[in-house]
Amino acid sequence: MNTPAPGASSAHAAALTAEYAAIWAYGPIGVRLTGPAQEAARDAEATHRRRRDDLVLHLTDTGDSLPADQAGYALPFPVTDEQSALRLAVDVEERTAGFWQAAVAATSGAERERALAALVDCAVRATRWRATAGITPLTTPFPGRTA
Amino acid sequence: MVLTWAVMGKTTQRDPLPDGRMRHSRRKALRVGALLTLGAAVPSLTGCDPFNEEPPPPDPLAPMVGEALALAAAYRDAATTHPALAGRLTPITEAHAAHAAELARITKVALPSATPTASTPADPEATLTGLREHERTAGESATRACLAAPAERAALLASIAAARASHLEALQ
């Protein structure tokens, strides 16, 4: 059993709730997309599922309680077409990035490396979704930082 | 540790070891210890000499200020040389300048007034290749810095590493 740094378990639990919500959101996103964009949504969803599974294992291993997944999550705006689906995908990745940035500060060593990799992945996917949606600029100056 | 020594000091000064050899007196050991401690303290006492003051060690993140400014300069120059790329490059220039300002704030390094110079190739493709290479190296440096940093700096460095990775994606 590992001895996590103080704050690490709550940061991981918070990241897990963000991953649950991201996986859920890619459902309505995916149905509005076609072709390569739908493929990218499937790939993103698989990545979020992988991270969710890693977090569940990790929190179980450290003896922390697991936050419960919910049957549904409130979307920040309705997803009615391709454009709103792409905007939600940007939003999902940018929100999730914030939780992983917090986990970076709460961890060290291999755990920090994993949190940083997740933050980088979310930031890169957000940029790809911005490019697909035609949103400029393609990047934000401080990924993960909540305005 | 100190308590153990005090209690043990009450025993006889010389006790024979099981093999019959005599042990050094504990008082002597304490005296030697005290002398060693004094010896170790001497360099730090000289360090307090106001006429011989050592500068504080440089902040390990100080070089990252210059690195971020050099990136900003490279993008700025590239956008000026190739106006067609300006739309893509200008937000990235601003991000690097914002990173430099944040890094200067946390390291208490003054931002230099002179901007570093950059040279941009005449070919736009070669320009983008050069920027990607620069961005990749800087991303690795931010990643290393983040993994080595104390908690209060790690979040900013992580964000900078993620920004650099997203710039690389935006240049594809």
Image (cartoon, helix red, strand yellow):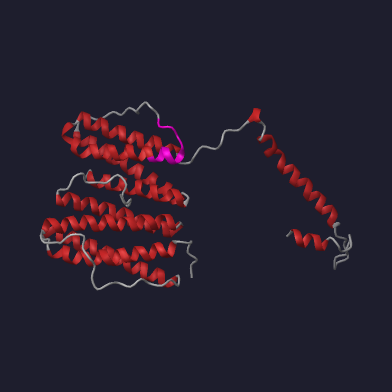
At x 34% / y 66%, what residue is drawn?
A16
Q: Nearer the viewer, residue A136 or B17?
A: A136
Q: What percent of the width, then of the height, locates residue B82?
A: 19, 31
Q: What percent of the width, then of the height, locates residue B149?
A: 46, 49
Q: What percent of the width, then of the height, locates residue B126?
A: 22, 35
At x 16% / y 61%, what residue is drawn?
A39
Q: Quadrant of residue A106?
A: bottom left
Furthest toward the top, the residue is B114
Please determine whether, in this image, residue B11 is positioned above or below residue B32: below
Q: Quadrant of residue B130?
A: top left
At x 20% / y 58%, what residue is drawn?
A89
Residue A113 appears in the rendering: no
Please determine whether, in this image, residue B153 is positioned above or below residue A9: above
Q: Is residue A17 found inside the magenta-colored segment of the image?
A: no
Magenta region's main secondary structure? helix
Which residues lie in the magenta part?
B102-111
Q: What percent of the width, then of the height, locates residue A59?
A: 41, 69
Residue B26 appears in the rendering: yes
Q: Quadrant of residue B97?
A: top left
Number of marks: 0
Please determine whether, in this image, residue B97 is positioned above or below residue A79: above
Q: Nearer the viewer, residue A73 or B70?
A: A73
Q: Taking A10 as reference, is A141 left or right?
A: left
Please determine whether, in this image, residue B33 is positioned above or below residue A17: above
